[in-house]
Image (cartoon, grey):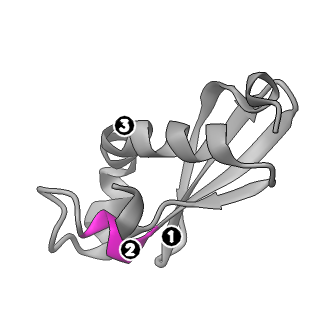
Amino acid sequence: MDHAAAHCLDLEPEIAWDGAVLLVWARTARGRIRCEIPRATIHAVPPFDDALSREIARDRVEIVNRMRPALLRKVAATNGIVIRVNLDDL
């Protein structure tokens, strides 16, 4: 894999919450990568361990910022167009 091509240039500012996953897009030299953070992963990050859906929606920027290192690691390691940050990625 060409790690330079997968290098994440930035996370796009729009973050969506559908009640099951947070969705944010990473921009890389080879295109956009869809990044998903499921509710179970969000609940593993203090202080969001018991966050309600409306709290996740409200705090989605802070959640993504706390998970940024895991997101960037997954983006750098993928050849695909979708990544999912799971509990074992934290």
Q: Earlier in the sequence, mark 3 or mark 1?
A: 1
Return the x and y of residue 16 as percentages of the image width and height: 56, 56
Return the x and y of residue 39 as percentages of the image width and height: 38, 74
Name which residue type carries label 1.
Answer: Val
Q: Which residue is mark 1?
A: 21
Q: Is residue 35 magenta?
A: no
Taking the spot 44% from the left edge, 67% from the top edge, the residue there is 86
Check residue 39 in the rendering and tell me which mark sits there, or answer none: 2
Q: Earlier in the sequence, mark 2 or mark 1?
A: 1
The reply to whether discs 2 and 1 touch (Cβ–Cβ < 8 Å) is yes
Horizontal arrangement in the rendering, residue 79 relative to residue 57 (left or right): right
Front residue of 52/45: it is 45
Taking the spot 36% from the left edge, 68% from the top edge, the residue there is 87
Name which residue type carries label 3.
Answer: Asn
Name which residue type carries label 2.
Answer: Arg
Return the x and y of residue 29 as percentages of the image width and height: 82, 24
Real-space Cα separation, disc 3 to disc 2, in angstroms: 15 Å
Q: 10 Å neighbourhood of mark 3: few (<14), some, or many (≥20)? A: few
